[in-house]
Image (cartoon, helix red, strand yellow):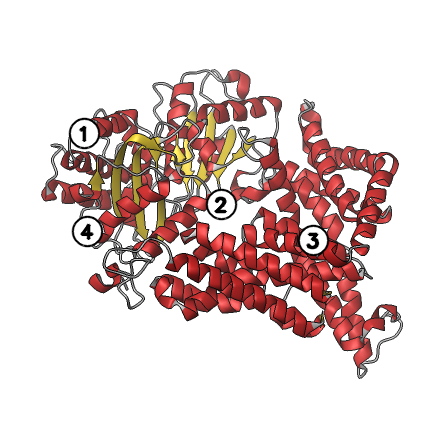
Amino acid sequence: MSEMITADLVDLDLSAETKEAAARALAERMVAEGRVTDLDGFLADVAAREAQMPTGLDGGIGIPHCRSAHVTEPTLAFGRSAAGIDFGAPDGPADLIFLIAAPAGADDAHLTILSSLARQLMNTTFTDALRAAPDARTAAALIRGDADGTDTGAAGSAGASGAAEGAGSADGASENTAASPGAASVGAAAGSTTAPSTASATPSTASATASSADAGGSPERPFRIVAVTSCPTGIAHTYMAAESLENAGRDAGVEVVVEPQGSAGFTRLDPAVIAAADGVIFAHDVPVREKDRFAGKPTVDVGVKAGINRPGALIAEVREKAARGETTSGTATAPVERSGDATEGYGTKLRKWLMSGVSYMVPFVAAGGLLIALGFAIGGYKINKAPSVMDHFLWTQADSWAALLFQIGGVAFAFLVPVLAGYIAYGMADRPGLVPGFVGGSISLTINAGFLGGLAAGLIAGGVVMAIQKVTIPAALRGIMPVVVIPLISSAIVGFLMFVVIGKPIASAQKAMTDWLNGLTGSNAILLGALLGLMMCFDLGGPVNKVAYTFATAGIAVSDPSDSAMKIMAAVMAAGMVPPLAMALATTVRGKLFNATERENGKAAWVLGASFISEGAIPFAAADPLRVIPSSMVGGAITGALSMAFGATLRAPHGGIFVVPLIGNPFLYLVAVAAGVCVTAALVVVLKSTRRQAPGGTPDGTDGTGGTPSETRQPVAA
């Protein structure tokens, strides 16, 4: 096992002004050391990880990181910036930047060392020593944890091997007892990070005073909390949050036992420890594994960054919930389904709630829409007048099968608005929001309030349940609250508001919007198509894309959609196919402008684009957003406008070229798609060709054969 960081991987005078430039400068050092085989491919992976969540932390720290197939061995590069670089931290720019590179198949011992570094970044003694390091050799030695503080191979290897040995043991001393930067080393800490159920389960009791009697504890013992931390990559934030919560627990006189669910696997907390806990903290950005183990306890559920930035507030919050007797059912929720951190703005929370409903609604749209479209394709446009298959079904008659498909699709479509409303409420208030949400959504259909009514019903249901949950309830009633009291009261309130107060105005607004869409002709329809095309290509499957898609599917989510609604659906699907198909075309006609990874992604993008999966262009957008995204938006706008101008219609909400037989004016529809693809591909090629010429190479720094210089110098890891 070679040294994870050396003096050659340290830049104490990092002059980059942006996080992208900083990552590139540090990654170039990794390439020079043979740790990274494809610079652009690796940076694309770093950018994709950064797009998930900013990697800046309080205290002037930036930790860009990723797992990548272009990394040959786990590696750290460290940069120190005098001016500071914005990595999205709440307290401002970062002056200490750690670029963490892990191979796609990194072994547990290596990942243990990386996770130990993440924990040590919570140690101010460690970070202060790095800020004061006089040279690169000293900084590298501090990060490795060399006892003598010098950059020697023997010491570095000893630190690494010691960490690897410690990875299999849970008997190492806690890293929080370090008295010096050397003792608080990556190697010394590694032993405690892979066995959280034991090493983390023995917090210092010296500071855990006999308080907390008012919040679920007792005079004889402190308040006890179990916590789970996790992040998308499972390398950095997972362990930083664990360290931060443990430190805050000691300061507050609370026992905190953490289960970090990282990339190197995780060790489950002892069931006895969980049973004895007075409260639970989930600080996660990916679903908690085996979450039902923690059911029935007061729970705080937040993103992983909240665990790093405000652990004391989380501990106080779970103690308050315990004092009120609040419990949770333990249902697993993804980040989009949670109300979010307390520090998030209302707009961010609202977007998450709405996306929760949309994400659950889309499968019903796809299944129901395709079934209905197939029914029309087999049985003709009058199939919606067919009698019920319960009364008339002939096994040998095509029209009977067409009617069956149409009627099954109609049943699936009938769930759209209730599911949308129910899961918006679920995103706000968890499982107690489901009943009033579904009830409100069904009432919306009953009073013809449609899609808009479903949105309103979901938000109202979630708000009502959240308000009820804040009321202090006698202990005798807590057991029946989630099963009887909350569903009863919330459904009654939501039903009253939908039937009597706001239902009629929303139904009128829904009718007005439908009439407006039906009246769109000529230039107005073309402009709407262009706008929807821009939205579909702006964030490639993100919130803006989903707004346009949901707008289109809402129009066809009825048994007899209008011609205008089907034109809008056609324009949206056509525009959504443009970005991945255009990237595939660009990598085919001018492959030398793209690195080897992008050319491979281009092959897959043909299928993804043809299937109407806009996310197929994300790797290209992440690597070069300033060229790819604007080009995609131009092509998408052209396709959307042409589709509307040609009068193409679509009853199916998904399927790409595979539902072309179900499209009205299919030839002109494909012409519209082809036009947008060609325009986007041409713009990308032109923009990439005219960017700054790299010394001795093609415009993107390739070697003239399509590969980057690093690909010709270094072997690709198996």
Question: For this rendering, which residue is in front, 137 or 650?
Answer: 650
Q: In this figure, which residue is indicated by the disc labeled 4?
A: 1
N-terminal of the two: label 3 or label 2?
2
Q: In this figure, which residue is indicated by the disc labeled 3?
A: 528
Judged by depth in the image, the label closer to the viewer, 1 or 2, is 1
Q: Amino acid at mark 2?
A: Val
Using residue 416 as the reference point, say whether residue 687 is left or right of it: left
Secondary-structure class at tag 3? helix
Picture quadrant where residue 704 is located: bottom left
N-terminal of the two: label 1 or label 3?
1
N-terminal of the two: label 2 or label 4?
4
- Alpha carbon distance from label 1 to label 4: 26 Å
Using residue 576 as the reference point, say whether residue 84 is left or right of it: left
Using residue 104 as the reference point, say whether residue 457 is left or right of it: right
N-terminal of the two: label 1 or label 2?
1
Q: Are marks 1 and 3 in contact (CB under 8 Å)?
A: no
The image's mark for residue 133 is: 1
N-terminal of the two: label 4 or label 3?
4
Q: Residue furthest bottom?
A: 396
